[in-house]
Image: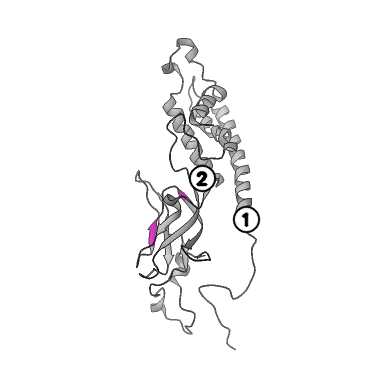
Amino acid sequence: MNLGDLLDELRHGILHDRSDQIAGSESDYLWSDARLIEYINQAERKFCREALIIRDGTTPQCCQVQTIADQKEYTLDQSVIAVISAKMDGDKADLSRGGHSPFQAYRPLDSYYFDPSALSAVPPGKILAFGTDEEVGPDDDGSMSVMVLRVFPKPDAAHAGLLRLRVVRLPLNDLCNPADVPEVPRDHHLDMLCWAAYLALRIDDHDAGDPQRAQEFKQQFELHVAEARKEALRKMFTPSLWGFGRNGFTYERDYQ
């Protein structure tokens, strides 16, 4: 379904907005096209964020990061909500995933003593790991919602290169024209309209509002999200492995 189809379904099939039959003018609709389109866009974004439905590993805009010598942090595209994996271009294996705390506490494996002054004092070189628990940055509108990716250690000139990501993301663009098609899979086009209907009906208005019906649409949307999320997680599922002495950052030897 394209935006024109979704708008028609939302207005006539779900909201039953038929006030135009009185005067025959779009201005007599209870909801304007612009408002309903905004609700549809909000519904698509919310569905993607909560259901993790869009996974991408090929779009350069959100899946490629050009690393730079001596730079450890990189702002990702504002559509990215999670990084599944990362791999330097040309490498055969993915980078390890870490975070701020282990990065700061890292010490070389051949150190047999604890020296607080040496914490995180790893020279630039080949990138070994990445993390996404750093601060967030501003998006195009100024909201602090953009993910910052950190690599460890900082690359040197010989190892700076293209970092390829597999991500979970939001739609890259809003739906604007009637022919625009949502990035959400077709099977979920009608599901996401439940949230758009909730937004339209949640107001306490004698003509346009219906809070009770709005709550019904909200509950339906949450059920659709739960089903889609379960399917998405099943596709991303990886069996857990148990082992000892496999920590990539520290390995404690037991001396008797």
Camera-side residue of 21 and 105: 21
Quarter where residue 50 is shown: top right
Residue 133 in sight here:
no
Residue stretch in magenta = 73-80
Q: Which of the pair 41/222 is nearer the observer?
A: 41
Pick whichever of labels 1 and 2 is earlier in the sequence: 2
Q: Is residue 76 magenta?
A: yes
Please, what secondary structure does the residue beneath circle 2 have?
helix
Spot occupied by residue 155 in the image (x, y as percentages of width and height): 39, 68
Q: Is residue 192 in view?
A: yes
Q: Position of residue 110 (x, y in %)?
A: 48, 83
Closer to the camera, 87 or 34?
87
Q: Is residue 7 above or below residue 227?
A: above
Which residue does the image show at 53% across and 34% down from the upper left?
Answer: 195
Q: Which mark is residue 237?
A: 1
* Residue type at tag 1: Phe
Q: Residues within 10 Å of mark 1 (few under 14, many from 20)?
A: few
| Above/below status of 149 relative to 170 | below
- Residue 49: numbered disc: 2
Image-based side of 70 in relation to 185, left or right: left
Amino acid under disc 2: Arg
* Quadrant assignment for the C terminus: bottom right
Residue ranking furthest to the bottom: 256
Q: Nearer the viewer, mark 1 or mark 2?
A: 1
Q: Callout 2: 10 Å neighbours few (<14), some, many (20+)?
A: many
* Magenta-colored stretch includes residue 249: no
Q: Is residue 27 left or right of residue 254?
A: left
Work out how far the residue at label 1 is from the one at label 2, CA to CA, in angstroms: 18 Å
State the residue at coordinates (43%, 55%). Answer: 64
